[in-house]
Amino acid sequence: MKKLFGTDGIRGVTWEYPFTVDFLKKIGYAASYIIGHSPLCPKEDRTVLIGMDSRESGEIIKKALAEGISANGFKIIDLGITTTPAVSYLVKREKANFGIVISASHNPPEFNGIKFFSSEGLKLTDDAERRIEEMLLGPEEINIKSSEVNIEKIDYSRDYMDFVKSTLPEGFNLNGCKIVLDCANGAAFKIAPAIFKELGADIKVIGDKPDGKNINLGCGALHNQSMLKETVDFGAFCGISFDGDADRCIFSDEQGNMLDGDDLISIAGPYMLERGRLTNNKVVLTFMSNCGLIKYFNKEGVEVKQVAVGDKNVTEAMEKEDLKIGGETSGHIILREFAPTGDGILTALQIVAMVRDTGKSFSYFKKHWNRYPQFIVSHKVEYKTPFDEIEGFNSKIKEMEAKLAGNGRIFIRYSGTEPLLRLLVEGERADFVKEIADTIMDHYKKYGGKFDEKRKIRN
């Protein structure tokens, strides 16, 4: 088990371990040391690209990381505020040795995170993350000798914007198309509106005034109520919410109904199949995807490969089988035709292009498959106690699965990025899945530890 790295880099509350300034310097040192000793990393012209989202803690974190990185002889290109997928794209294009994004993605402002990208624009392998952890947590103290910090600031926004637009069909435009954009007061606040405007869209933008303290607060992919309402009020073709680092997106149809990642893949999969773009007639989903979506794909002749939650798991499955699309319910979609990692802006444009090409509305695609009712519970935990150490818990899960009798499922896990237990129960009747979820969580409450509960139901 890794202790620092979760499903998406290292994440935590700023100025608490591991996000203390001293330890951040060590993270920069250990990561650059491990990557610097890779056979793929030359001894000369070592370069790292660093981008960040709009959190006020980003500058101090960047400075601390830079001190550790510079001690291993790397030059640093500071990209300023930019999106996670922009760094993924640029690290490969600029032939940098690796890239860093300082972002806690969809988390609130008090959190921050560190994501690493290889020279190929991919997240680091589990093996590389383990070796970095071993160095950071091992018995040998990391002593960082002071050295000159070599930082050059370069704005590559134009280059990234041109790349995203180049993925669209020749002659594509959004002239006269009304679209609402919610930029989460995050990394996309300039880039996303600029791209849509250049394509001719008539846009209304919210969440585009970051102040360092308001990222993801009441806006963005996880808090999209304002976007849904504005879409209706504006009479828009659709609305789009990005998260803090713009590697995911959530849509609204013209009637104010939300379309999540499952909905977006339900549009893209058959569309790509019809046009011969879906290699092996297969898509990759995680175990969080709705059972109704899998049944829909089976009916449409699209095979499904399911993997554990985390974009790295999706990417690995796509690479292994040469698949072109995969993603998560959260709206993190990987279109491997164009990019090796999830890109909210690129995904948004591709989905809009597909829907416009069909001549249909987004509300049509919201209704074209039957979603099983889901009951989702998130609990804040002090300890991520292994389930087999909780008295009678695995037996309780099996008992509840037997009640579903194959017409639904139970999925439970600890979050890889937050101190949360996540439970999803899915079945044919909403009241029944709620009853099962309550039973499981009552058992966890009694035997598994402390938590604060937040509940929401989707139908």
Image: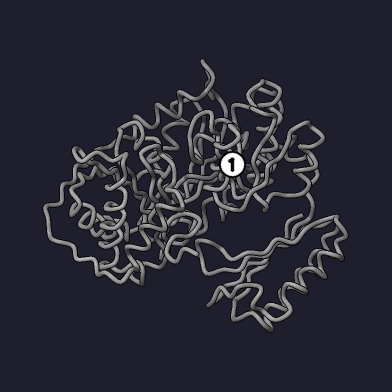
- Residue 270 in sight in this render: yes
User: What is the residue that sits farthest to the top in this orientation?
Assistant: 171
Image coordinates of residue 290 in percent, x first then y, are 73, 49
Q: How is the image coloured?
A: one colour
- Residue 256 in sight in this render: no
Q: Quadrant of residue 293?
A: top right
Count of number-bearing discs: 1
Q: Is residue 409 left or right of residue 51?
A: right
* Residue drawn at point x = 66 percent, y = 21 percent: 276
Seen in the picture, residue 458 relative to 267 is either above or below; the reply is below
Seen in the picture, residue 231 relative to 111 is either above or below; the reply is above
Q: Is residue 235 left or right of residue 17?
A: right
Name the residue that disc number 1 marks: 317
Image coordinates of residue 200 in percent, x first then y, are 49, 25
Image coordinates of residue 31 in percent, x first then y, are 31, 54
* Residue drawn at point x = 44 percent, y = 60 percent: 5
Q: Residues within 10 Å of mark 1 (few under 14, many from 20)?
A: some
For this rendering, which residue is in front, 175 or 10?
A: 10
Question: Label 1's element?
Answer: helix
Q: Quadrant of the C terminus?
A: bottom right
For this rendering, which residue is in front, 126 or 419?
A: 126
* Residue drawn at point x = 43 percent, y = 51 percent: 185
User: What is the residue that sits farthest to the bottom in this orientation?
Assistant: 446
Q: Quadrant of residue 378?
A: bottom right
For this rendering, which residue is in front, 365 or 416?
A: 416
Q: The disc labelled 1 sits on which kind of residue?
A: Ala
Image coordinates of residue 364 in percent, x first then y, are 75, 34
Q: Quadrant of residue 383?
A: bottom right
Q: Is residue 416 left or right of residue 408?
A: left
Seen in the picture, residue 132 relative to 117 is either above or below; the reply is below
